[in-house]
Image (spheres, helix red, strand yellow):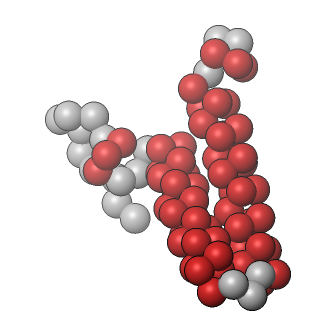
Amino acid sequence: MAQMEDPRFRADQLKDMLRGAMQRAKQETAQVEDIQARALFEVTAEVLGGLVDSFEHYEAGTGPAWQRAGEPRAHR
């Protein structure tokens, strides 16, 4: 299977992009004084962190959302 057709490759690319955006939001949080903007950037970083975690679970095949019906769940 060609690399660009492999969903794991695409997932890894998206995960890297999300991680970069998360890091940028964290940086911006430290650089603004406006309390509402700071809260927005903090929430953005948290949400993006959750998405990065989801991509990592997908890659590892862990978590109930990534288990196929009838397959035993992976233990942590």
The one nearer the camera, 48 or 16, is: 48
Residue 38 image point, x, y percent = 65, 80
**Quarter of the N terminus within the rendering:** top right
Residue at 70%, 18% (x, y): give it.
Answer: 4
Residue 61 image point, x, y percent = 44, 44
Residue at 62%, 21% (x, y): give it.
Answer: 6
Location of residue 43 with respect to 3 vertically, above or below: below
Q: Is residue 13 visible to us here?
A: yes
Location of residue 4 with respect to 74 vertically, above or below: above
The one nearer the camera, 5 or 25, is: 25
Residue 30 image point, x, y percent = 77, 83
Q: Is residue 60 visible to us here?
A: no
**Quarter of the C terminus within the rendering:** bottom left
Residue at 29%, 50% (x, y): give it.
Answer: 64
Residue furthest toward the left?
Answer: 70
Q: Does 24 sit left or right of 7 as displayed?
A: right
